[in-house]
Amino acid sequence: MTYYSGEAPLRGSAEHAVQWKGVIWQFTSASNRENFEANPRAFAPQYGGYCAYAVSHGYLASGDPGAWEIRDGRLYLMHSPSIHTMWQRDHVGHIERAEANWPSVLRD
């Protein structure tokens, strides 16, 4: 949830963990965990946490929690800071292509 507070992301703790969609999500506070539990889709990264740039190009790559961006209230992870720089050159086009590719890219 620290992504949405404008701060750099912080590592959560097992003390404030919840399971959603088969994944353990850890938060920095009980309040952040409760906000997530109330509406996880509003806070979870797009494309299952995979690299949004990669999804926009039709393949999967891991997302790096330290290479991220929020656009229109949605969290996007990138594979690396250098990929994030490439994403920023045409984020609108990348989002359009990623939306067209998702979730079919999971089957490739």
Image (tube, rainbow, N blue to C red):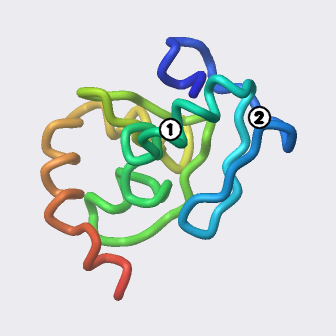
Element marked by disc 2: loop
Contact flag, marks 1 and 2 (Cβ < 8 Å): no
Query: What percent of the width, then of the height, locates residue 59?
Result: 37, 71
Query: What percent of the width, then of the height, locates residue 72?
Result: 24, 27
Relative placement, left or right, of 1 versus 55 is right
Residue depicted at x 44% and y 69%? 60
Given the image, on which type of amino acid does mark 1 rest?
A: Ser
Mark 1 and mark 2: span between their CA atoms? Answer: 25 Å
Relative placement, left or right, of 72 versus 4 is left
Query: What percent of the width, then of the height, locates residue 47?
Result: 38, 58
Residue at far top of view: 6
Residue at far bottom of view: 108
Q: Residues within 10 Å of mark 1 (few under 14, many from 20)?
A: few
Given the image, on which type of amino acid does mark 2 rest?
A: Gly
Query: What percent of the width, then of the height, locates residue 43?
Result: 45, 38
Q: Residues within 10 Å of mark 2 (few under 14, many from 20)?
A: some
Element marked by disc 1: helix
Residue depicted at x 59% and y 13%? 7
Which residue is at the front of the view, 19 or 90?
Answer: 19
Residue depicted at x 61% and y 40%? 65
Identify the mark nearer the N-term, 1 or 2. 2
Q: Which mark is residue 82?
A: 1
Q: Which mark is residue 26?
A: none
Return the residue at label 2.
Answer: 12
Which residue is at the front of the view, 103 or 38?
Answer: 38
Vertical position of residue 40 compared to residue 8: above or below? below
Vertical position of residue 12 compared to residue 20: above or below? above
Quadrant position of residue 74:
top left
Relative placement, left or right, of 14 versus 63 is right
